[in-house]
């Protein structure tokens, strides 16, 4: 079978609370502009809100006025565990305080080795993560390429997880592989 090659996330659609609670959370708390809305074309009794998470793609939310904050959509096999949104280091460093100020319980800052995370819940209990990489990849490389190289370095040293030193060595190796230096050449 020939594979169907994906090229990134097109959009993610979630079940949300009522319309205003959903707008207040996705735009008011997470700063995602409310781009447009229309009925769910598969079920006109459900509203469909569209938000820009910051990369021009879409997070969409199905809303029903009967779904109130504090309720929960039934977990099912194949349901979403959490959504992670990338934020800048500056935003990440403000996240816990700003969530606290908004009355939203959260985990506080968590060091994940190659990134930092903070977790909290949307109005219906969906776990949301704000994630911030600890590094920027070299020009022409991706985060995934750095992480793949850091994985190999971590495994070779017998480490349990990727650490700062693995990231630094991976970035240095990628830059060396790009062959931009004349040093050491014939």
Image (cartoon, rainbow, N blue to C red):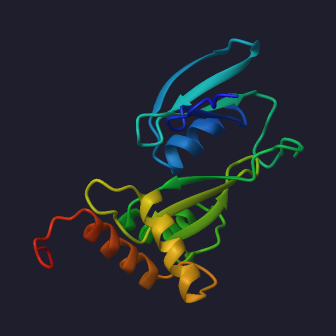
Residue drawn at point x = 64 percent, y = 72 percent: 107
In which quadrant of the rendered image does the N terminus lie?
Answer: top right
Residue 57 at what x, y percent from top left? Answer: 47, 34
Residue drawn at point x = 45 percent, y = 80 percent: 166
- Taking 115 as reference, is 85 above or below it? above
- Taking 170 as reference, is 25 above or below it? above
Which sits in the foreground, 86 or 30?
Answer: 86
Which sits in the foreground, 75 or 71?
Answer: 75
Total marks in image:
0
Q: Residue furthest front?
A: 186
Corner quadrant of residue 139: bottom left
Residue drawn at point x = 73 percent, y = 50 percent: 126
- Taking 162 as reference, is 65 above or below it? above
Residue drawn at point x = 42 percent, y = 43 percent: 54
In which quadrant of the rendered image does the C terminus lie?
Answer: bottom left
Asked whether residue 114 appears in the rendered view, the answer is: no
Residue 119 at what x, y percent from top left? Answer: 63, 64
Which sits in the foreground, 1 or 30?
Answer: 1
Corner quadrant of residue 161: bottom right
Q: Is residue 141 left or right of residue 75?
A: left
Residue 111 at what x, y percent from top left? Answer: 55, 78
Asked whether residue 139 appears in the rendered view, the answer is: yes
Q: Is residue 33 left or right of residue 73?
A: left
Residue 184 at what x, y percent from top left? Answer: 15, 79
């Amino acid at each position: 079978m020939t594979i169907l090659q994906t090229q990134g996330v097109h959009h993610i659609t979630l079940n949300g609370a009522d319309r205003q609670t959903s707008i207040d959370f996705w735009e008011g708390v997470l700063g995602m502009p409310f781009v447009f809305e229309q009925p769910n074309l598969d079920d006109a009794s459900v509203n469909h809100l569209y938000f820009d998470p910051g990369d021009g793609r879409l997070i969409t939310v199905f809303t029903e006025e009967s779904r109130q904050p504090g309720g929960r959509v039934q977990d099912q096999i194949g349901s979403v565990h959490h959504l992670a949104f990338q934020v800048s280091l500056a935003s990440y460093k403000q996240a816990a305080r700003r969530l606290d100020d908004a009355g939203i319980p959260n985990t506080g800052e968590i060091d994940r080795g190659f990134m930092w995370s903070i977790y909290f819940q949307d109005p219906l209990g969906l776990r949301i993560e704000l994630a911030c990489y600890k590094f920027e990849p070299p020009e022409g490389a991706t985060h995934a390429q750095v992480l793949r190289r850091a994985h190999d370095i971590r495994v070779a040293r017998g480490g349990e997880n990727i650490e700062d030193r693995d990231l630094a060595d991976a970035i240095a190796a990628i830059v060396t592989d790009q062959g931009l230096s004349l040093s050491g050449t014939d």
